[in-house]
Image (cartoon, coloured by chain):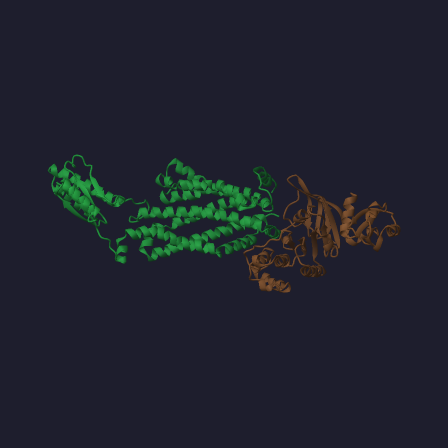
Chain colours: A green, B brown
Amino acid sequence: MRGLSLRNIWIVAKREYLERVRTRSFLASTFATPVLMSVLLLLPALIASSAARDLANQQPPPLRLVFASDNPGLAELARSQLLREDGAHYVVSIDPSLSNAEHDDLASRLDAAKIDGYVWLEDGALANPKIVFTTHRAGDAILHQRLSSALTYAFSAERLLQRGISVNDTASMLQRVDLRVVKAGHPPGVAELRGTIAVLLLVFVMFFSLLSYGVMVMRSVLEEKASRITEVLLCSTTAGELMSGKIIGTGSVAMTQIAVWFSIAAIGAARSPYVRAAVGELEAGVPLLIYFAIFYVLGFLLYSSIFAGVGAAFNSVDEAQQWNFVILLPLVAASGLILPVATSSDSMMAIAVSIFPFCAPVLMFERIAVHNPPAWQVALSIVAMLATIAASFYVCGRIYRVGILMYGKRPSLRELTRWYRHA
Amino acid sequence: MQPRVELVAVRKSYQGFVAVDDLTCSILPGQIFGLLGPNGAGKTSTIRMMIGITAPDSGIVRIFGAPLSRIAMHRVGYLPEERGLYRRMTVRDNLSFLGQLSGLSISTSAERIEGWTARLAIDEWLEHRVEELSKGMQQKIQFIAALLHDPDLIVMDEPFAGLDPMNSMQLKDILLELKTAGKTIVFSTHRMDQVEKLCDSICLVDRGKSVLQGNLKEIKAGYGSRFVQIDYDGDGRFLAESALIDSLNDYGNHAELSLKPGADSQELLRSAMSALNVRRFQVMEPSLEQIFIDHVTRK
């Protein structure tokens, strides 16, 4: 009997879809994930945001720092520069003495928590700028960076002043350059760092969704084999319809989950500036979302057809486990390449792996998001994926047709080849 | 009359093992047909080819006079040997899904589900998950799934397995009703005693080959009065040594035997009475099981 009945595919897909979306695990993963993601994304923003602190009405006390130097001008330059840093919340005093007794006094005040740290600017520091900052806050990287920046400015300014440059000229010579990166084709003002975070978020959503829902197709086939319902189904429908319906139904569940996540993000972005900051350019990135949908669907069709074949070939999840790793290897490799591809998106390596059909769903999408690759590369990757999907459906469909009625011992590769030939 | 099912020189092998070998048989409309044989004889493989679940390696399968088509598939109801339902779905959802796959609309399917479950007294379980049902109830659901779309050809692999006597009787009554309505019913079973009262025609298979087939009454008549049952007290070794007996199944104080061709049952009775205390001696029509054993033994 040839040809596929769309009606039967629809009935099988509908059952698969409804059965999965009604489960508690689906509801939990669909609604708990955004909460978890929100916590992970928003918590740092909330912690860093002074507005959040105002909201909580719990402004922490400023850090108390001491610059000990026998060059009050240098110390004052460093102090004023430090207080100019964005988000600086410090009280800085200058100690003009560099005696041993003064050093001991500062150390004891630090131990008594009367100050949070002191910078010891010894005589000759200008010639040999190796400065010691003593503090209990050795892990505060932001403070260290700000101090380093302020001291570098102060030393440079002091050297210029000593060469007779006026204070105003010194200030203008040392004015910091404000470098802004603007993505080509995007209006200035889009926060690129936030945009990149959103892209990486999409890439990870694609990776984990392909992984979990591909495996779900395999589990579904194994469940039907174990419950022996396959034989009943095959009396009314064909193996091809069954496999197609299963893949479409499970794929629709995955798309539903992602749609819910995106909707929650969109609603959150509309209502909360913090969520808007976290999801970055998603709200303006409709073309990107279309690419996401295209590559997600293609990736899902490719991986789920292979998983369906594997599910049909074995009798239990345990048996199929070792094949899982082989199937997922390209996807795992692609996940390892996410950061290298993001930093050198137009390298030969990035082009090659993003056209390779098993990595393309993640890496070509990532390149589109961060780099705008040439259209021919995007088209080539889509054509390559379509051809691989067709081949996968053909080969795995044949294994599926025979495998779903096979019980007993685990098939060898030779037996799988025989199934393929005899299907 | 055009056969409902025709198998012509059908062969099927699995990895070198020949499950069905050159099998030819035809099943007429309105018949109850028994595909009988011991475990591993090739019954399930034959049925799977009959309804298109698997394709034969060689030979021809026709159903309703033509190669299997989608329309023909919707005219077949199948109860497989390995019962299977979605365990976490409700009874109603299971039946509705299987009914729709067999070509029914949602509304027709819903109506028939109500009717059949009420008739088999399991309507109160409609909203329960299948995993909550007893094995017997699950079997009833499976039975309904096979009949829901009112098929013209009903194929049942070991239909009475696991059913208690009351449910077996209910199933038998429904099948007879369906036969009266003109449906064709194919049984596959190794429990020949259970179906011989129902079957019009049979095909006995052994090691993938048909060893005997035809109208059951004619087959039995062909065996004449060569089968004897004896209830006795005493040393039954006499029976094993008798030159009149072709095959013997001795239970200690009850024996079932077939006489050699031309042997006289009265002569056996006389010699038995001289050696044993005979409580009952009955010349009778052979059972299907006896016919099968006799046939295979003689081969």
Q: Which of B12 and A44 is in front in this view?
A: A44
- Extreme residue in the front direction: B234
Examine the image and state in which quarter residue A334 appears: top left
Quarter of the figure with the C terminus of chain A: top right
- Extreme residue in the top direction: A127
Left or right position of B48 against A15: right
Examine the image and state in which quarter residue B19 appears: top right
Q: Nearer the viewer, residue A131 or B122?
A: A131
Q: Which of B190 and A153 is in front in this view?
A: B190
Q: Taking the image as drawn, is residue A176 in sight?
A: no
Count every numbered label the image shows and give the total: 0
Q: How far across and down, in percent of the image, does residue A58 sit?
A: 25, 56
Q: How far across and down, in percent of the image, does residue B223 sit?
A: 82, 50
Q: How far across and down, in percent of the image, does residue A354 sit?
A: 42, 40
Q: Nearer the viewer, residue A7 or B183?
A: B183
Q: Taking the image as drawn, is residue B252 in sight?
A: yes
* In the rendered image, the vertical position of residue A341 relative to residue B184, given as above or below: above
Q: How far across and down, in percent of the image, does residue B50 sit?
A: 67, 49
Left or right position of B231 against A1: right
Left or right position of B82 against A96: right
